[in-house]
Image (spheres, rainbow, N blue to C red):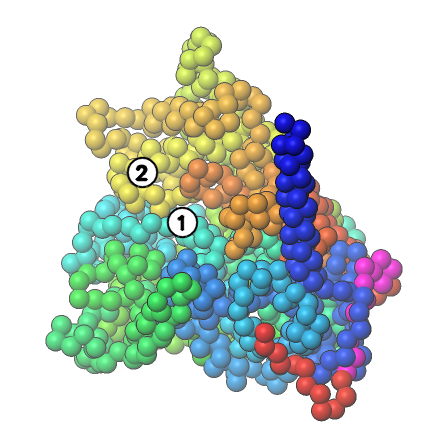
Amino acid sequence: MILIFRWLLRIATGLIVFAAVVIGLIWFFLSRSLPNYDATATVSGITAPVEIVRDLADVPHIFAANDSDAYFALGYAHAQDRLWQMIVARRTVQGTLSELFGQRSYASDALMRRLDLYGAATDSVAAQDEAGLAALYAYSAGVNAWLAEVNRGALGRGAPEMWLFNHAIAPWQPADSLGVMKLMALQLQAQIPAEVLRAQASLLLPPERVADLLPDAPGDGLAALPRYAEIVQDVPTQFALNTTTRDMLQAAPMPGFEGASNAFAAGPSRVASGGTLLANDPHTGLTAPALWYLARLQLRAGDVIGATIPGIPLVLSGRSNTLGWGITASYLDDLDVYIEEVNPANANEYRTPDGWKLFETRDSIIQIKGAPAVTLRLQWTDNGPVLPPDQYDLGTIRPQGHVTSIAWTALARDDASYSAARRIMGARSVAGAITAAEGFIAPSVNLVLADRADIGMKTLGAFPIRDPEHDSQGRMPSYGYLPQNRWQGLRPYADNPEFRGADNGIIGNTNNKVVDAPFPDHMSFVWGDTQRILRWEHLMQQRQVHTRQSFIEAQLDTVSPTARALLPLIAANLWFTGEAAPEGTPERLRQRALTLLAAWNGEMNEHLPEPLIYSAWMRALQDRIIRDELGPLADRFTHVDPVFIERVFRNTDGAAIWCDIIQSAQVEDCDTIARLALDDALIWVTEHYGDAIESLRWGDAHVATSDHPVLGDVPLLGWIVNIRQSSSGGDNTLMRGLTLGSGDEPFLNVHAAAYRGVYDFSDPDNSVYIISTGQSGHPLSSHYDNLGERWRRGEYIPMSLDPQIARAGAVGVTHLLPATAGLDQTGASQ
């Protein structure tokens, strides 16, 4: 027995030692890719010594003798900290993810090949101005200098993920940066799913019910559209929907997860210090690491600091000492979906206003890891690229013998948007920045500006000119061969909406409706917000003057104007239901829930139970209202539309008819449906979180999921690389935390302000900013998640351009020295 015990002890000890050795070796190889910030490197591509000073938060402060050297150092720093993120972004826009990830990413690759965004980026390199082109080449040289350093020093392949997905890394090129910008445009694009969904709904419902279900943003009304079946003939009214699941590797966002943001500015008359203020928090998908990367650049026109995206040599939201700028998604309607008729006698031709014409075609081969390669036949019409029926559910809204194409400004092959954005960074005033931005095409954004004395906002992006007789006003797909449906050019930049020094001294945007011009002079029918703007207006007007702190409070505000408006309307006849019901009955549980909600102020605080009860109720309510009319299409409505719910319960234009269940003999009213939906919600809540509803926490359901896009689902690794935190806010709060809306965890916070910044021009070094994770993309780095907890708590870090502050607490200083003539380390392959 003792002998057996000894042998078991020896085996166990051996296994422990073996496991320790394996773990040690894994850690050793993975840690090799951690950059050493206290280093000196001799590189080719710069003309004078450069310093990269990393402050306490690992923000690189770049000190260079000229702009090209500064952009070089930014590329070097981006590659040091976010090389894997950059590689994935480049492969996404190129349509080559499947070489690494196999069948999982095939749909994304196929879409990108058909759109040919990378081809458009490659052609657009020549469209940049001289300074923009120099910046792109210098940045690329900086990225490639780090790749050369990785190769020469055997630095763990540059990123730990490269050990699992071993593949050659091509040198970075200017087209790669422009491609990442075009990828941003795709991820902000909401028009394709909006057009398809409206067409699908129109096939099932009369126009007045479509107007309920997909309501226009509040404001002046619009004439009702005809049914989609009257615009496009012979479309089947029975259709099968593609299964859609969230995959962070997909290039196109899930419907409803397009870009969103808040940006607002106050002029001197509305600021306590007499200066100006600007706040910006772009809302993007939460990932680990975050999309954003903080950096400071010393440039000839003045130092700039703020939020960058690895792969793009720009400060997209930030400030200099004289100007601040922020961005929001504009929701400009810069895309149309077309139904193209194919010649029944020749499938290689499509109808145009002048007769049949050959498709422009090209074959493209997608290499798929672990599977045979696939050859795609790419097609283009005069309107734009042809997309297959399985993309965006396009097959459900086209008749037989037709294909779908899109016209989209982001497909421009002479797109100088990068150069325009770079010029904004060098502007010294609001007026100068608006002038500098001319030529910006895509992605369309609202640019909110503040200098030391003025504020303003300008919508950037190319506006298509549409015919007043357009069949669908661009709201649904239309025949591409009819002249009235085709674009008639682009509007001049001067016509883009512009606001300067608002009369009340405050300008802002929450993706709400900016202008309300009638078609075809409109900007969009689809807007990203009808609710946050109400709370923002209230917060701005309740103070005569603002401070940096009041702007921070607005960014972090978690009161839901939607909850405050809907609950008294929906529960008006449910608050009191007679005597208390016996404990343990559904009626008693309902009474307890209503008692909580009656005393609630609408704050979506992570520590409260009411936000969870309210959110589950509204979700169940909308589903009960629409499911019988829409059937499977109801699955596409993953988030509650408060304007729709309000129309129903106010019986606007007869919308209360939605509450009657078609399949039942009796006529249900909205109070009955509200009560049944509350019971549904409470069953769901108690099954998932227990029946002690007074002890529920919204934050247990509303978890901010900054997950690693590739390794996040891998057992054990997911625990290491994912950053998950309880969070406040919700779909319609200023501190937005958009919920997943589907699956077993529908209230996960997956889309939020991954960057926040407040720029104070009474004392610019009093400005602050933060991101949702950390600066490093390396899970073993102490800077991988160190800013995440501060972000969750609503804290910020200093945003100073004072070099002494950066140096005082530096965690490392990298010195880049110019190589002697004849050496070339700017290109690398691995």
Quarter occupied by the N terminus:
top right
Q: Is residue 767 left or right of residue 469?
A: right
The amino acid beneath tag 1 is Thr
Q: Residue 352, image x and y in percent?
A: 23, 77
Q: Is residue 754 left or right of residue 382?
A: right
What is the span of residues highlighted in magenta in the rendered image?
806-818
Q: Which residue is label 1 attached to?
A: 245
Residue 28 image-quadrant placement: bottom right
Residue drawn where x is 45% and y is 53% of the image: 247
Q: Residue 574, image x and y in percent?
A: 42, 20
Q: Mark 1, residues whose alpha carbon is within 10 Å: few (<14), some, or many (≥20)?
A: few
The amino acid beneath tag 2 is Ile
| 233 and 751: which is toward the camera | 751
* Residue 811 lies within the magenta run: yes
Residue drawn where x is 44% and y is 8% of the image: 582
State the separation of the CA atoms marked 2 and 1.
Answer: 21 Å
Q: Which residue is label 2 attached to?
A: 626
Residue 801 against residue 279 in the figure, above or below: below
